[in-house]
């Protein structure tokens, strides 16, 4: 299959692009800068970077014309709605049955108090990503939504674990918010395997939303501590309340536990890296190497 992927120079997208190429797909990667180090590194895995911008619907339509499927892992913080609407519009323009694998996350549940999240848990209709998922459904485009839990592993580039590595190497490790909270985790390479699983038989997953996490929720308190140890810190953690009022930071005061059994059953997908704590030393080495 020829797959156009967005965001392949990003943290999640790079792992997905490499996994798709490894699964035998012809992978084209939309990036604003095909000359960047991260774009050029994709070529080593047989992924072809193509210059493009999400906001440009006409340009996108041209790229989509030659694709059999689209994987969307890009996230434009400056214009998340405009970027994704341009993609939906371009897919409608080309009029075909190209399957879109669309990435969101647990933010679609808003500031919830659910003990466990499942695909049947109602989303927060006011949440921006939940609204985009609804627009995609209304557009009638063939698609599958993937909602990962807390992503870790690899170079942890734009992940919460990467933030903790950074803090551990500078001012010192800090645990924020409620100390007894528990989160579900997913290794970035296991997440990537879920995209390849969808594209094995996309029509079987049309209109479905899958939650992706490994089987064992782990307290962020343990992960902050292990990330600090992996980064060579031996001093005690500092504790801080959640001071930033942005809704995104309120996750530091709640549980975010995922039941991913529906994804396992439907996709025949089983996470291989099921221990976030054990994965941290290797991830820290990759995080450090990416900075030299
Ligand atoms: N990271 C996590 O821990 C995590 C957890 C749960 C869910 N997610 C979701 O996973 C997705 C990917 O996250 P990530 O952390 O991998 O993101 P990231 O590392 O920040 O990468 C974002 C990518 O988006 C591309 N991009 C941004 N604006 C663009 C535009 N206007 N046109 C074209 N490309 C554009 C960038 O590519 P270029 O600069 O090359 O153009 C970049 O590679 C997001 O939807 C995120 O919400 C992530």
Image (cartoon, rainbow, N blue to C red):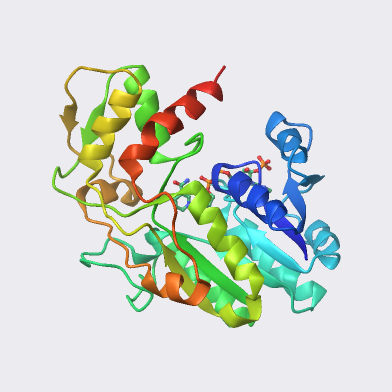
Q: Position of residue 196 (x, y in %)?
A: 62, 62
Q: Which residue appears at 28% of the width and 44% of the height?
A: 245
| Residue at the spot 73% in from the left edge and 42% down from the top edge | 45
| Relative image position of residue 76 (x, y in whole percent) | 58, 48
- Horizontal arrangement in the rendering, residue 123 relative to residue 197 (left or right): left
Question: Horizontally, is 256 left or right of 137 in the view?
Answer: left
Residue closer to the observer: 267 or 79: 267
Residue 58 lies, with reference to residue 223, above or below; the image says below
For the question of whether residue 284 can be seen, the reply is yes
Q: Is residue 142 at all visible to an observer of this figure?
A: no
Depth order, front residue of 76/160: 160
**Quarter of the image where the N terminus is located:** bottom right
**Tally of numbered tags:** 0
Q: Is residue 256 left or right of residue 72?
A: left
Above or below, 77 relative to 141: above
Q: Quadrant of residue 177?
A: top left
Quadrant containing the C terminus is top right
| x 31%, y 55%: residue | 184
Which residue is pictured at 79% across the width and 78% down the height? 95
Q: Quick check: 208 left or right of 218?
A: right
Relative to 159, does residue 66 appear above or below in the rendering?
below
Residue 168 lies, in percent from the top left, at 32, 22
**How far from the left and from the top, in percent, is residue 288?**
49, 22
Using the image as rendered, state which of residue 105 and residue 12 is in the foreground.
12
**Residue 227, picture quadrant:** top left
């Amino acid at each position: 299959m020829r797959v156009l992927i967005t965001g392949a120079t990003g943290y999640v997208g790079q792992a997905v692009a490499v996994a798709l190429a490894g699964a035998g797909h012809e992978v084209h990667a939309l990036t604003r800068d095909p000359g960047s180090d991260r774009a050029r590194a994709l070529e080593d895995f047989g992924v072809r970077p193509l210059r493009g911008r999400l906001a440009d619907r006409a340009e996108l339509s041209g790229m989509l014309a030659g694709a059999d499927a689209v994987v969307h892992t890009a996230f434009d913080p400056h214009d998340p709605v405009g970027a994704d609407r341009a993609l939906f519009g371009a897919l409608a323009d080309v009029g075909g049955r190209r399957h879109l694998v669309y990435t969101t996350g647990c933010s679609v549940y808003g500031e919830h108090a659910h003990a466990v999240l499942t695909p049947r848990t109602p989303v927060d209709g006011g949440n921006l990503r939940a609204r985009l998922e609804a627009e995609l459904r209304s557009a009638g485009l063939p698609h599958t939504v993937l909602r990962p839990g807390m992503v870790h592993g690899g170079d942890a580039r734009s992940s919460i674990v990467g933030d903790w590595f950074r803090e551990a190497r500078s001012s010192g490790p800090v645990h924020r918010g409620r100390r007894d909270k528990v989160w579900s985790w997913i290794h970035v390479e296991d997440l990537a395997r879920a995209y390849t699983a969808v594209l094995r038989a996309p029509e079987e997953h049309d209109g479905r939303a899958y939650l992706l996490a490994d089987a064992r929720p782990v307290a962020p308190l343990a992960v902050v501590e292990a990330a600090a140890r992996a980064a060579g810190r031996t001093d005690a953690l500092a504790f801080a309340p959640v001071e930033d009022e942005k809704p995104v930071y309120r996750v530091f005061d709640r549980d975010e536990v995922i039941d991913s059994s529906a994804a396992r059953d439907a996709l025949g997908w089983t996470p291989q890296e099921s221990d976030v704590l054990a994965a941290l030393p290797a991830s820290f080495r990759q995080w450090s190497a990416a900075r030299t």
